[in-house]
Image (spheres, rainbow, N blue to C red):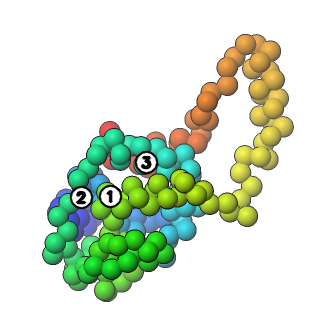
Amino acid sequence: MSKCPFCGSEVAEVKIHHLDMRICPKCYSTFFPCDQTMALRCDITDRSREMWYNALKAKNPQDPDMTNACCIDHGEPLVDGKLPDYGIDGKVTTCCKMFHLPPSLVLQILKRTLDAPFQNPNAHGKHHFFFIRWIDALVSKMFGEKMPEVDPLDELQYNLHLKKFFE
């Protein structure tokens, strides 16, 4: 376990496919390697990112004091700069390529990914199951059952990995 460089609390490790991140359960800051930017978009489902965004926004966390903040892994001072791959002003490392994101930047990045969803040309998504879902909808209609508005499987990733930080 490592400590949050902003508030000093123990951070929790969260591994979702290729994304290795750490989240502070006290100040809600998030830390992950810059080379995993695409994993944030590809490995976390749209619904999980949406639920994460909504839960974080509902908590309305204030950014922690980032003066004298240091790298979570190396202890080197963070400096003002542009976040790699995002071009957003923030605190950046000089020793490694690690995102140190306070809640306001996490919200901004999640919002950006939700506003412009990533279309992975290699992903096939749920359209493979169109026929099965069509049959299910037909049977449900015949028996008067209403289809759920949100597929519970879309919420599984959030419920398993992220929900514990916000409830």
Q: Which residue corresponds to mark 1? A: 104
Question: How far is disc 3 from disc 1 in space, using C-alphas?
Answer: 13 Å
Q: Position of residue 66 (x, y in %)?
A: 20, 68
Q: State the residue at coordinates (30%, 62%).
A: 102
Q: Which residue corresponds to mark 2? A: 63
Question: How far is disc 2 from disc 3 in space, using C-alphas?
Answer: 17 Å
Figure check: 123 above or below 92? above
Q: Earlier in the sequence, mark 1 or mark 2?
A: 2
Figure check: 46 above or below 92? above
Q: Secondary structure at mark 3?
A: helix
Query: Taking 20 as reference, is 7 left or right?
Result: left
Q: Considering depth in this image, is 13 or 32 the residue closer to the camera? A: 32
Quarter that holds the C terminus: top left
Q: Secondary structure at mark 2?
A: loop
Q: Which residue corresponds to mark 3? A: 52
- Disc 2 to disc 3: CB gap under 8 Å: no
Figure check: 100 above or below 119? below
Q: State the residue at coordinates (73%, 13%).
A: 144
